[in-house]
Image (cartoon, rainbow, N blue to C red):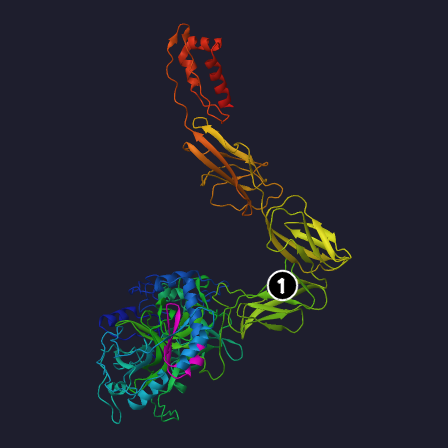
Amino acid sequence: MKTPRFQLTVRAVAAAAIALAGSFYAVPALAESGIPDPGPTASPSASPSTTASPAAPSEATTAAGAADPAAAPAAAPEISDAGLAEAVRRDLGMTLEEFNAAGQLARTAADAVPSLRELPGYLGISLRDGKILVEGSGTELEARVNELNGAGTAAVFVLVAPVAGPPAEPSNIPSAAPKAVPSAAELVASSTEQLFQAYVREVGPAALQAVAYSGGRFIIRTGGKNAAEAGGSPVPAQPTEPASTDAAPGKISPAEFVARYANVQLEQGPPVTTEADVYGGEGYAIDRQTICSTGFGAFSAAGLPVVLTAGHCAEDGTARTAELEPPTSATAGGAAPMPGTLAPLGTFGFSQFGGLHNAWVLNPTWDTGDPGDPGNVGTDIAVIEALDGGINVQPAATTWASAANPGPTAVKIIGVVAPFEGQAVCRSGRTTGWSCGKVAEVGTYVVGGRTTAAGDLRAFKGFLSNDVQSSGGDSGGPWISGNFAVGTHSAGETSGANFAIATTLQDALTKFPTAVQLQLFLNKPELVAPENLTFMTGQPITGRVPEAPASAVAANSKVRITVGSETPLEVPVDSAGNWSFPAPATPGKLTFTAETVNGFSKSGAVALAVSVSDLDAPVIAAPEGGAALISLSRIDGTGTPGLTVKLSGDVSGSAEVQPDGRWSIPVAGPVYGQLAVHAVQTSDGGVDSPSVTRTFTVVPGVPAVSSIVDGTHFSQDALPATISGTGIDGADVSVAVDGTPVGAAQAGGAGVGARSVVRSMVPHVLVAGGRWSVPFPAGLTPGAHTLSVTQSVDGIASAPRLVTFTIEAPAAAPAAVPAGPDGPTAAVAVLPSGTGQLPNTGAGSLLPTAGLAGGAILLGSVLLGGTKLTAARRRAVR
């Protein structure tokens, strides 16, 4: 047992004290039983990866008793990526699309590894800047990289030469041990597996932490004494001890081993300890002693739902029951007081921590059978089975955006991918919540086992991140890349140089004695059908499985078709999500259910219905698809003589197919814009044929300008109030003078030939009653100007109507006329040549100022100048 008493709480105060003491150990989350204490709780420091700063329960807070239905998380019917987008932006500086693309890139890399691994000169793969870097050299390797890129496609795979020269100083470890730079290195490591076995055979596992690959080099990392989980209480903090440089009897030292290799470096790191810790990432209690996190939903070989988690959480197979921690009671969910009872989750089944049967790296009671491979490299995986009937495991990982309702922001899982250096990943756990970073290295990791024996060291394949945050209780939680599962959380360190280690899920799934399938998120299928949902007998009924909101359709998915009581038919889904099955030979209505399936994973069934017809679809011969027409008077085609062709959509009508197989349907009234016409053949009492669709455009005619005649001259002080004309009722008219749009605001309706109006950002006016009008623009300077007017329907614009006009400066005020013998002489207005317009002479202001005398002179009208003045005013006003 972990503790003498069992209370479900994180020891926040003790953990804080250990951290202050300078410990390099990540302490497991422990639990003791007792009576609930409603008193105040301790508040640990906020984790960088949590969204809040929750208070952790005190040591007096308890958890025991009978089941509380409210404590179990409700199954969420809908899952979205809403919270993930913000999380990856915050932690990785990436968009959701970029994060999903990173997962897809890792999938592409994983598919290529088997063909690369056997080639001479291959060292490893890393991901960087949207590229897959294949590290190594050789003509065969280069040829394979070129083959993977393919002809005529953007190069995704890039061959990079191995790193040369002495090892670089490690930047992620607080204190690096002196490294031996080989003076005459003869060996070149080719894989972490080979290097690990060689190290264990020649040096031994003591103080070994990892054999990994990163930055073009292999790394042997050693450290202080790895802390094994004690049988009674948390392992006390111990200062870091440097790795011994002395060789064990019959062995060589780590430095001597590394000196043999040209591409291996020696590093020292702090001790690694496992973190004892129903959406992946939620907490659960183990026999009322410790807390871990759920990993991924899965299925047993019998198709029963199970939950994957860390193997060390199963205590070498001694753990029995698992109970769900309410998400709001988790540290990442707010640390609300634990309820008196917990909802049952299930019981532990198969588990493995280290080698087969939980074997140590070197175990006197266990022999690998191969003297050349003495190290028991295994995994860190366990399964929780016999789930409670009320548990509904979801194929998704919680982001802890909302502890009370994790479903809407959970991340869907659609497959498994191997980890690669540089890969963007995120982790979920009940203590530190959601945290993202990049894979720094991939290799074999060694951690302390369950006992206090010095030789109890466990090795497993995994990967490490220096960015991802973790703590006790996060063990077993899911690691993802995009929508792909990458691993389950195993170990970490936060009090020194931060790092987190996960078990590689792809490898872990191979360790189960019977097959275990990962639970996958699958979208429901939908139809891709003609307009009238009709298919011909014997022809494929087609559909698709949507990719969104996940980044891809899970590989090897199928659609299960069930018609009535008939035996279900499973049809494959291609990489684009397309599927099909043949229509029955009997025409009529066909109702069926369709469900996307992938192994034991299911999307849930959806009811679909189509019509099956024995009539051929008609052919639309004219106009041609995509044609741009000036006008449309009829639609022609061919069909089966004696049947009737019916048109619907933007043009309607019907006609009988003539004995020569031709038909023609006139178009009533003018139509313009983007048009789609659907045609079927029909017969009395039968099912209409499948629909065919033809799309084309009819360009509107040029609008008319009625208020300005081409070549007109205006005086600047006698400009018209509006520019107006005629056009197609309901069309958008755009008016511009000298290329500058003229704004307008006028309501209007739609008329014959007008369809949905596509608004633009350019000022326009809607034709109403066949007419349009805009205000004449202010501020035009004297000189020549060009008016351009176009009209559009459905975004299809006409050719422009171009009209030129000239604005002239007003005439200067007339000079004073000396009085003659018969009185003052009237000023004479001068007409501009060829304008047909008279300028405003200002005579409107002469009458008030001239008084009665001026009025008498005008009324007398004996002089020619008085006559011209009056005419000029009348014509200018118009």
Residue 3, image x, y percentages: 32, 77
Does residue 327 show up? yes
Residue 773, image x, y percentages: 52, 34
* Residue at left offset 34%, top offset 92%: 364
Residue 563, image x, y percentages: 66, 69
Residue 431 occupies which quadrant of the picture?
bottom left
**Pick the front one: 50 or 229:** 50
The verdict on residue 474 being magenta is no
- Residue located farthest toward the front when viewing the structure as drawn: 833
Q: Answer above or below: position of 310 versus 362.
A: above
Q: Answer above or below: position of 47 versus 354.
A: above
- Residue located farthest toward the top when viewing the structure as drawn: 821
Q: In the figure, is residue 108 to the left or right of 790? A: left
Residue 37, image x, y percentages: 34, 66
- Magenta residues, as a range? 112-138
Say what amino acid the circle numbered 1 marks: Leu
Disc 1 on helix, strand or loop? strand
**Pick the front one: 732 or 191:** 732
Q: In the figure, is residue 848 to the left or right of 77? A: left
Does residue 719 show up? no
The verdict on residue 133 being magenta is yes
Disc 1 crowd rating (10 Å Cα; few below 14, some 14-19, many 20+) is: some
**Pick the front one: 220 or 151:** 151
Q: Answer above or below: position of 785 versus 549.
A: above
Q: Name the residue under label 1.
A: 608
Residue 174 occupies which quadrant of the picture?
bottom left
* Residue at left offset 53%, top offset 66%: 523
